[in-house]
Amino acid sequence: MDVLVVRHAVALDKDEANERGVPDAERPLTKDGRRRMRRVARGLALSVPKLSAIFSSPWLRATETAALLQARFTGVESVESDALLPDAEPEALAQCLMEYLAGRPATPAVSVVGHEPQLSEWVGWCLAGRLSSILELRKGGACLMRFADTVGAGQGKLLWLMTPAVLRQL
């Protein structure tokens, strides 16, 4: 199974949100962030032609990013998961994905949409077996990992990593 890991798009600045009294979990994507993410989603659809599900953090900027992805991929299930919150343990996301896969026919790929540094640490855990940010996911950036049988520590293989600028040019 392939897992497409996507960091949420550009959202309302944290300081500006504090000034407006907007909680961190409710920071929306900016107009420019939505525009750029639509182009990123187009590039992702060329790179990963089929998804069966998009898992996202329940925080607004992640759900809005996931919705923009879902608009580009037809027939994709959308699932919000606390396993994608910024302070979630890597095992929680691995378990969430394994539970989704249990009893299903072979799945081409699923996507997870969340936050930094949790996503980079999860990727590091999947690739190297230790909780470490071994790569950087920019806002709207993505990477694709492949798992043979189990989503877990040291079980992933990195297929590619792309910045949002590269994805927008595809």
Image (cartoon, rainbow, N blue to C red):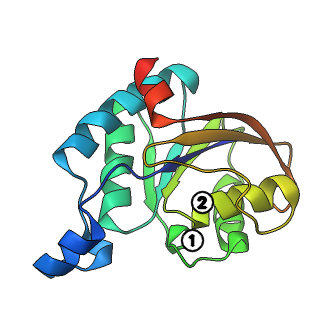
Give me the residue at 29% from left, 57% from top. 11
Of label 2 and label 1, which has the lower sequence position?
Answer: 1
Quarter of the image that includes the N terminus: top right
Left/right of residue 138 with respect to residue 97 in the rendered view:
left
Instruction: Indicate whether 57 appears above or below 74.
Output: below
* Residue 52 location (% of width, % of height): 54, 40
Identify whether 96 is placed above or below 35.
Answer: below
Q: Amino acid at mark 2?
A: Leu
Q: Secondary structure at mark 2?
A: helix
Q: Is residue 160 left or right of residue 21?
A: right
Residue at which label 1 appears: 83
> Which x, y percent locates residue 83?
57, 71
> Three-letter amino acid code at disc 1?
Ala
Circle 2 residues within 10 Å: few <14, some 14–19, many ≥20: many
Rendered position, 106 above or below 103: above
Real-space Cα separation, disc 2 to disc 1, in angstroms: 11 Å
Which residue is disc 2 drawn over? Answer: 119
Q: In which image quadrant can residue 21 be found? A: bottom left
Question: Does residue 79 show up?
Answer: yes
